[in-house]
Image (spheres, rainbow, N blue to C red):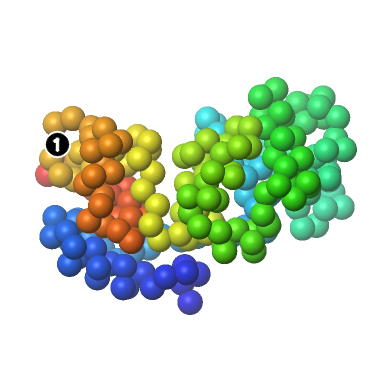
Amino acid sequence: MSGFPFRPAKAVAHLRAADPALAAIIDAVGPFRMQLKVSRSLFGSLAEAIVYQQLSNKAAATIYGRVEALYPSATDGFTPRHILKTPDEHLRGCGLSRAKVLAVQDLARRVDSGELPTLEEAHAIADAELIERLVKVRGIGRWSAEMFLMFRLGRPDILPLDDYSLRKAYAKAFRKRALPSPKALEKAGEKWRPYRTVASWYLWRVLDQPTA
């Protein structure tokens, strides 16, 4: 089992047939090796996303570890109730900025009140509706929501139009002098439906390839 709610081999075959230029990229990159991140809960995933924003992985992991250490008895990870009962200064003491403290608290309130779905419920919600609900959380923009759908839920048809690396990869892959606008990238990606997540993964890998 791949963990994806679709068959990666079928997705790759579809992309090959739909776009010969992308087929050449697939040949250069090799097998589809995208891996889903393990999630214990929607809250845990989004709280981690908030902490990691605009930080190196090493710095973010240190801060996140300090937050987890505030709750030594929470063997399955801290919960919204933990966050809501924790004084601001304790969260700030872990290295969280004021903005991130407010974001994590807003997330905790929305999850605790049932405004946001559980991870299990999220699997049954359509992409557009789920993104619309997630971006209401302070500190969670469309990009963060799309990354959640792609790398936590394994949704097959997400094309993160505002992702700079993806636009840069598209320009490199298709030898464009300038980065495509989000609108231009959206138009180009129409042929990749319903597997734009897989197409995005292959394009990102282009940045790892040496320039011809």
The x and y percentages for residue 142 are 49, 39
Q: Which residue is nearer to you in this view: 166 or 122?
A: 122
Residue at 85% across / 35% down in the picture? 86
Q: Give whichever of 12, 94 is nearer the camera.
A: 12
Crowd tier of the residue under label 1, counting other residues whose Cα lies within 10 Å: few below 14, some 14–19, many 20 or above: few
Question: What residue do we see at 74% from left, 35% from top?
Answer: 105
Is residue 68 visible to the viewer in this orientation of the structure? no
The residue sitting at 76% across, 40% down in the picture is 109
Q: Say whether residue 93 is left or right of residue 53.
A: right
* The C terminus, quarter of image: top left
Q: Quadrant of residue 160?
A: top left
Q: Please, is residue 203 above or below residue 14 in the view?
A: above
Q: Quadrant of residue 84?
A: top right
Q: Is residue 93 shown above or below 5?
A: above
x, y percent for residue 72: 84, 49
- The total number of labels drawn is 1
* Viewer-proximal residue among 142 and 83: 142
Q: Secondary structure at mark 1?
A: loop
- Name the residue carrying label 1: 176
Residue at 72 percent of width and 42 percent of height: 110
Amino acid carrying label 1: it is: Lys
Relative image position of residue 181 (x, y in whole percent): 26, 32
Q: Residue 154's spot in the image, x, y percent? A: 47, 60
- Height in image: 105 above or below 147? above
Q: Is residue 84 visible?
A: yes
| Residue with the most extreme bottom position | 1
